[in-house]
Amino acid sequence: MAALATLAASLLLLLLLADVCGAAMYKVGELDAWAPPPSSKPDVYVRWGKSRPFKLGDALFFLYPPSQDDAVQVTAKAFAACDVADPLLTLDDGNSVFNLTAPGRVYFTSSQPGHCRKGQKLSVDVPTADGKFLAPSADDQAALKALSALPPAAAPTEALPSLSDSDDDSADAPRVAGAGSVLLGAAAALSVLLFL
């Protein structure tokens, strides 16, 4: 019985540590669905991606009708050109989760015709474990140059905002409980059962 109690205490300690380092899941754009942005907020995904405190282990949740849309991960160059011919990853089940497992910048858009050009595109910067951001790669820099060289009809209607330009306060950004919080609740229930 003592071994079982030690195991339960160890499991609880491990889960408490996991909760401190717990990851968050963010619903992309915080709109009803991942879709072309409304005309009243054409830069919603740009602002949203820049205003969240992402970290390694967090996840992006793309919600959309699977018969009408998808989310594709693309390269920096493909992102700038809205070229969805050769995506790195296709998410198409309507409730797609992408885990942020590596530092750097990741790019997403929709492969549906015209959606990317209408602003349905998202880039997210993920810092290293110590909170530092990686310098933009040559491809990232080329994508930014290509983006600024797009014809006026395809270019964004306003300059890309910096974090300080955001209307959102990242401290107030909704965070969905990550696996650490769920496991902590399960561990608490298990420990109560073990000690009864």
Image (spheres, rainbow, N blue to C red):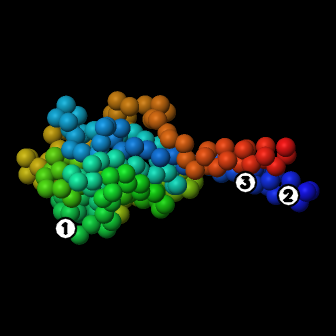
* Residue 67 position in % (x across, y down): 23, 54
**10 Å crowding of disc 3: few (<14), some (14-19), many (20+):** some
Task: Check disc 1 and report the residue beneath it.
Answer: 85
**Can you say which quadrant of the picture contains the N terminus?**
bottom right
Task: Check disc 3 and report the residue beneath it.
Answer: 14
**Res. 140 in view:** no
CA gap, disc 3 and disc 1? 44 Å
- Seen at 33% across and 60% down, the residue is 91
**Above or below — where is 148 with respect to 101?**
above
Task: Check disc 2 and report the residue beneath it.
Answer: 4
The residue type indicated by label 2 comes to: Leu
Residue in the foreground of this view, choosing between 7 and 60: 7
The residue type indicated by label 3 comes to: Leu
The residue type indicated by label 1 comes to: Ala
Residue in the foreground of this view, choosing between 30 and 184: 184
The residue tagged with tag 3: helix, strand or loop?
helix
- Seen at 49% across and 51% down, the residue is 58
**10 Å crowding of disc 2: few (<14), some (14-19), many (20+):** few
